[in-house]
Amino acid sequence: MLSRILLVFPATAIALAALALLPACSSTQPSSTVLQAFTVLRDGTGETVGSATFTQVDGGPVTLEVTLQGVAPGQHGIHIHAVGSCVSTETVLFGGAGPHFNPMAKSHGLQNPNGAHGGDLPNVTVDATGAGSARMTTDRLLLAPGLASILDGDGSALVVHAGPDDQRSDPAGNSGSRIACGVIEAG
């Protein structure tokens, strides 16, 4: 009787067989884990002069996209600092951000054979109109929990300096005064 049903309804039989095989053929791809953070950069008067976004996919390197506007033309060192605070101290604008983020106790500079700090980043070039942007990737920090996380208990800040970072000199690459700061927030 079953053979007669299959002969009478061959299309139905093929469809049922195909449906039975679907679970074996389907591939389940794990979904990606995407972590993000952001900051708004403000100068010493509180004016917004830029922003930055941080993205980490599946525990891989962190991609940072930074934009600046209303900043003096030229190259500017930017660094992630160890504390999520942009308050000024008596002697240092944005001194509350502390030193560079450096969980592995390395020397400063992307070109230093004993470096680099987790928070060391390439310079950002600002054009004659005061605008600049850069996209960079680093594997020396995390958005996920861990020793190299910039979203740890006391947070971290992104700081823009007045001049270029020489990428070699301790402790900050001779990049000059801090001119803008933003606390990095998960998001």
Image: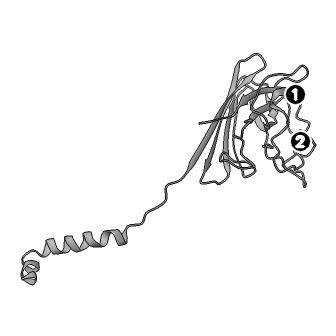
Labelled pair 1, 2 in contact (Cβ < 8 Å)? no
Q: Position of residue 62 (x, y in %)?
A: 67, 48
- Identity of the amino acid at label 1? Ser
Residue 166's tag is 2
Q: Position of residue 139 (x, y in %)?
A: 72, 52
Residue placed most toward the observer, 122 or 53: 53
Q: Secondary structure at mark 1?
A: loop
What crowding class fits label 2: few (fewer than 14 Cα within 10 Å), some (14-19), or many (20 or more)?
Answer: some
Residue placed most toward the observer, 137 or 148: 148
Mark closer to the chain start, 1 or 2? 2
Q: In the figure, 115 relative to 154: above or below?
A: below
Query: Quadrant of the rendered structure where residue 47 is?
Result: top right
Q: Residue at x 30, y 73 (%)?
A: 21
Q: Secondary structure at mark 2?
A: loop
Residue 115's tag is none
Tell me if 177 is positioned left or right of 154 in this view. right
Q: Nearer the viewer, mark 1 or mark 2?
A: 1
The residue that label 1 is drawn on is: 177
Tell me if 106 is positioned left or right of 80 in this view. right
Q: Position of residue 177 (x, y in %)?
A: 87, 27
